[in-house]
Amino acid sequence: MEYKLNEQQDKLLNMLKWFHNFCESKGLKYYALGGTMLGTIRHNGFIPWDDDIDIGMPRSDYEQFISYCKDLKGEKYVVETIRTKATDYYYGYTKIYDTDTTLIEKTRKNIKRGIYLDLFPLDGAGNTKEEAEKIFKSVHWKYQLVMARTCAILPRRKWYKNLVILLARLIPSVLLNNKKQLLKIDSLCQTKKYEDSLLIANFLGNWGMKEIFPKAVMGEPTLYKFENIEIYGVYNFEEYLESLYGDWRKIPPEEKRVSLHDYIECDLNKSYLEIEEV
């Protein structure tokens, strides 16, 4: 499929190149995940209608990356985590933002940042399916509750899901503090060590239990062509992609070739640091 990168994808590609070079310089491991891994194999780059990048890092590399980034000063890209002081950051994973851009996402409290790269911790999930599912369940419902309390009501969402969101918002912060809950969830994700487990998981990913894999499937990070650069991805991409997407080689019908993100504003030429609060 022939296509030309749009401006947002071009900027995301620059961010991915920066991230790859940074990890190489520090000896950190990472993998392209989800739609980014699918695009890498099926399109040798972005899925043409995709507008974000998903990356995973083994927990120890993930924490080292965050630690290294604390020392970044005056950089174009900034890193935010659950430990950030920002009161409007409610993700359980890390985001890398382009400070030269503005992206306002539709949430309960509209979040003003830039375009981003999503960075997920990959954690140990034990040695059996039962162990992995037990950890997943302990994380999943707690995380879904925080997401319900912070996301927006959407007309395209089923009515009963919007009802759950409204009910979740009724829980007072003194009983359920979102930030504290995210820190507890992060600790639960680390129940098993990555190094000691035969199974690993992206517990905070979008695909539920499908994001639990044998560590051998991930293997050693493997270089693949991505647009005009090379990035690291999953070693056994066949098994990984089939688990997530089924017949991943099949291009979806045209009506499904759309972004699933809800943006109120996206300005690729204006820094979110320079605009008024929303």
Image: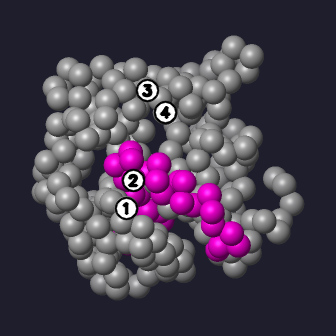
Q: Relative to the observer, which residue lies in front, 132 or 74?
A: 74
The x and y percentages for residue 108 are 69, 38
Identify the element where label 2 is drawn. Answer: helix
The x and y percentages for residue 98 are 62, 69
Residue 175, quarter of the rendered image: top right
Residue matched to label 2: 61
Q: Earlier in the sequence, mark 1 or mark 4?
A: 1
Write the residue at 19% across / 44% down: 215
Residue 187 is left or right of residue 176, and the answer is left
Q: Nearer the viewer, mark 2 or mark 3?
A: 2
Instruction: Answer yes or no: is residue 81 visible.
Output: yes
Q: Is residue 70 magenta?
A: yes
The x and y percentages for residue 229 are 34, 82
Vertical order, 4 against 179 (above or below)? below
Does the CB distance between marks 1 and 2 fall below 8 Å? yes
Identify the element where label 4 is drawn. Answer: helix
The x and y percentages for residue 238 are 13, 57
Residue matched to label 4: 186
Q: Residue furthest right?
A: 276
Residue 275 is left or right of residue 97, and the answer is right
Q: Amino acid at mark 1?
A: Leu
Q: Earlier in the sequence, mark 4 or mark 2?
A: 2
Residue 28, labelled with which disc? Answer: 1
- Give the CA distance from mark 4 to mark 2: 15 Å
